[in-house]
Image (spheres, grey):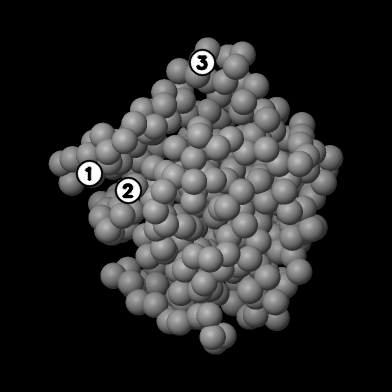
Amino acid sequence: MGSNQRSTTTELDIESVVPASIDIDATARVVNGVELNVVTAGDEDDPLVVLLYGFPEFWYGWREQIAPLVGAGYQVLVPDQRGYNLSEKPQGVRAYRTRELAGDVRALIRSEGKAAAHVVGHDWGGMVAWELALRYPEVIDRLGIVNAPHPTAYRRQLRSNPEQLRRSWYAIGFQLPWLPEFACRYDDYRLLERALRRTARPGTFGDDEVAAYRRAWDRDGALTGMLNWYRAATRYPSTPPREQVDAPTLVVWGEDDDALVPALAVDSAGFCSDSRLELFPAASHWVLHEEPDRVTALLRSHLGS
C-alpha cells in the first residue's frame, strides 16, 4: 500500500455485499488534492476497470458487477466520488466542477501506475466518464455509459425539447441554497428514498438497499456535497476541448427513464466514432439494478472485445 493510501472501514461490511472469494479492500487515497474512499478488487496486474455511480448512490451501486468483472480477469476500482459517503467533501460549489470530477478519476487511474483504463459510468458517473473521454482521451481504453447523456446531446435536448426540460425540473430546484438539503433530509430522507423506489421497477430497491444508502446520505456534509454536483454544472458549465469520443463506446439505455428522454440514447451514441447502443425498452433509469446480469454480460463483451 502506497504512502498516499490507508485502509478504511465502513458500517457496510464489503464481504457481506461482494463474495469473499475475491480479493477486495477499501482504502483512502489522496488524488487530485482530495481524499477518496476507493473499493478495490482483483489483481493489480490485470487490466483496470473504473466504475462510477450516479446520484444519489455511492460505490455500493456497482456491487453486482464487481465480482463478475474480477472473474473475467479485470482489476476493479469503485471510488466514492468527491462529496459522497466516506470521501472528502470540499467546501464551495466550484470544487465540484465536472472537470474536477474527471480529474479525480484521471489521477486515480495514474495512482494505480496505469496509463489508461476502461471506464464505465451510470447517471452522473456517466457524465464524469463522458467528460474524461472528451478532456483526457489518453486515459480511456474503452468507455461504457449507462443512462447518461453526452453533454452536447443533453444541452441540445434541453433547448429544443420541452419534455426534457420538464423532466429536468428537479435539477433546477437543486440550485437553491439549503432548502434542497432540508427537503432531502426531512422525514429520514423520504424524498431520496422515493426518488429511488418510485422511478424503478417495483422491488428493485429493498429495505436493506435503502438502509445502506441512507447511512451514506447521513454522513456529515454528504447532502451538500452531492447536490453541489448539480449546482456546479449550472454555474460552471463544462467546456471540454472536443465533442467526438474516439474510444470504443458501449451505451446501455433503459428507455423507461423518468429523467431522460429516449432520444438521448441515439443522440449520445452519435457523438462516438465507434459505438454500440443497447436499448432496454422495459427498463428504467435504474437498468443497472433491474437487469444486472444482462448489463454485466454486455460490459464483459464490450471490454473484452
Residue bearing mark 2:
223
Residue bearing mark 1:
185
Q: Nearer the viewer, residue 94 or 270?
A: 94
Q: Nearer the viewer, residue 224 or 93?
A: 93
Q: Where does residue 298 sit, x and y in percent of width and height?
A: 66, 51
Judged from the image, the secondary structure of the residue bearing numbered disc 2 is helix
- Identify residue type, mark 1: Arg
- Identify residue type, mark 3: Glu
Mark 3 or 1, nearer chain start: 3
Residue 97 appears left or right of 185:
right
Specify the quadrant of the image occupied by residue 186.
top left
Residue reaching furthest to the left:
187
Which of the labelled discs sits on residue 163, or is there none? 3
Q: Where does residue 113 sit, x and y in percent of width and height?
A: 70, 77
Specify the quadrant of the image occupied by residue 171.
top left
Identify the image quadrant of the C terminus: bottom right
Q: Residues within 10 Å of mark 1 (few under 14, many from 20)?
A: some
In the rendered view, would you say 206 is above or below 153? below
Q: Where does residue 270 sit, x and y in percent of width and height?
A: 77, 31
Name which residue lies at 49% across and 46% down: 94
Name which residue lies at 67% across and 41% down: 251
Q: Are marks 2 and 1 in contact (CB under 8 Å)?
A: yes
Query: Is residue 29 in sight in this rendering?
Result: yes
Residue 271 appears left or right of 158:
right
Q: CA distance from mark 2 to mark 3?
A: 28 Å
